[in-house]
Amino acid sequence: MKNLTKLLALLLALIMLFTACDTGSNNKESGDKKETAASTETVTEPATEDETEPEAESKGNKETEPVTEAPTEPETDAPLSDYRLSISRTRDEIESMITLQSTDFEDAHTLLEEFESIAKTSSNYEEVDATYMEFEDKFYYIDTQISLANIIYDLNRNDTAASSRYLDNYDLFGDLYNAYMESCRNVYLESPIRDELFADWTEEEISQLLNYTPESQELREKNEEILVELNELSGPDAEKRTAELYAQIVTNNNRIAKLAGYDNYYDYATKEVYGRDYTREDIAAFKGYVMKYFVPNFNALSDGWYNKYVNLGRNAQGFMVDFLYEPFDTLDKNYLEGYVNSFDNSTGAGFKSLFENRNMIFASSQNSHQSAYQTYLEDLETPFCLFGSNGQSTSTIVHEMGHYYASLHTPHVTSYDLAETQSQANEYLLLKYLSTQIPLPVYNALSEYNVYNTVAMILICVIIDDFEQRVYSLESVEGYTLEDFEAIMSEVCLPYGGTHYINSKITDINEYWLAVCPNSPVYYISYATSSISALNIFSIADKDEAAGREMYRKLVEETDENDGFKSALAKIGLTDPFTEQTFIAMQDLIVK
């Protein structure tokens, strides 16, 4: 029963909607948010020309700041421009779309009971399928309503009414989820047409169904409450408290994994959350190539873009800073609009539908979700983007536009790595487009900066992954303090130059893991592997822009939701990021 399988994936996805990064896709538990690069990027802010005295030059080379989802106290909220307002839905429009009532959950439970009753006694597949579809339609409505409520919450996370509505709906959904799993298990055990109903289920899905207990959902709900508390932390003791809460999340996650038959959450998430078709051995090989080809060249790469930058004039430096950080429509011209209009094929049509249908909303509050994401509204059958207060630059819009375009074709893609390649590669195609739109010296500095930034982010991601592998393999983290976790991170950083080197050259690594690991557990290796594939597409486009664009179109339109990361790349002719060949091919971008 194909629809039943799809709904299982969707239900599991919604559980992670508020806890996963995000990034994501409706695979297993992965959630339907696809987070922007801003949620993982490390960004070194260039100084302007009149800051190139020795002290100011040091500022230009300051440690890289991660852009995270941690809430910040606003000085003032930034009003939206007329242009952004013209292409965006308003908060009132989104609110008017939220019509969910508690009776909708009651109706869903009734429909589910009817489905179970008929499925346990009837041998008529069409009759069973018809009752199931009634439940599915109600579920899609509820799913979309919760997504819309979450968007309102993310517009201003200090909105207590929005927060309460979001948590209340989440709790009601947990009850529905538990009932659904119980019904499916009963149907599997008692239905006279079980084999037909569950024909599309994998052995892993059947095992997960039979081993499911409500305790798993209760643990996820506890984690959600912890994350809400994390969003509200401030003051001098916030880091210590974050570490304590992280220890609770790790404990809960490992318990979830054990209930599902896994030794630890790292292995569970690799398979069940992120849909990875690669192994720990592949990851180890990948990290070995990062050490061999990226670490030795990092200093030169860092110096290279900065030297180009400081030799630019004041106006050119100002443009580069503004392009990286300011809203896309505050620049000297709208490069986003030009980029979209430069496509005259199906890719361009996909991009344009985002604006034509106003399937986005921009936040003005500094208390909003800080970066950006794309979510899929099931009942409306459309992707939708939220751009937070610090997620409105040209590159961020293009990143989410890549997710949006991909979701038009495969809204339930099973691989996070594939999804993030589809978004990051779009940023690199934008970069190539700029080569004919801005002065060559500015483009060269911006291009080298983007490659440097990607390599820096890859280094951070593999460090985070090493850290999480160690944390989740511990027998227990009960009672662990900030100092305990920092000691683990210090050991992890040694092969990459040590904590002091990472802090001085890239980012404060302890601030970074505190910001990302509680919110997006075991996610970051996917961002690293997808970055290599995005760089691969850039290396093609750098030599032949049309070829790079066609490779990107294939990556989106010729892969399907069941493709794994490695199989999807092989299908369109991109090299495997877990092989040394791929890293060797990157050297013309890395070594200048």
Image (spheres, rainbow, N blue to C red):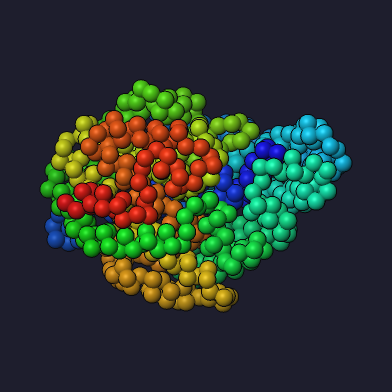
Q: Is residue 139 above or below residue 338?
A: below
Residue 219, image quadrant = bottom right
Q: Which residue is drawn at 27% across and 42% down?
A: 539
> In the rendered picture of this protein, how many numbered marks are placed on residues?
0
**Extreme front residue here?**
195
Residue 417 place in picture, x, y as percent: 45, 48
Q: Residue at x 84, y 37 (%)?
A: 123
Residue 272 place in picture, x, y as percent: 58, 54
User: Viewer-proximal residue, 170 or 303?
Assistant: 303
Residue 558 place in picture, x, y as percent: 45, 33
Q: Which residue is drawn at 61% across and 31% down?
A: 380
Q: Residue 204: tell me if it is visible.
A: yes
Q: Which residue is drawn at 38% across and 55% down?
A: 578
Residue 296 place in picture, x, y as percent: 23, 63
Residue 493, image quadrant = bottom left
User: Viewer-proximal residue, 77 or 583?
Assistant: 583
Q: In which quarter of the image is the N terminus?
A: top right
Residue 143, image quadrant = top right
Q: In the shown orientation, is residue 287 left or right of residue 279?
A: left
Q: In the shown orientation, is residue 23 left or right of residue 28?
A: left
**Extreme top residue here?**
344
Q: Residue 334: tell me if it is visible.
A: no
User: Viewer-proximal residue, 351 or 325?
Assistant: 351
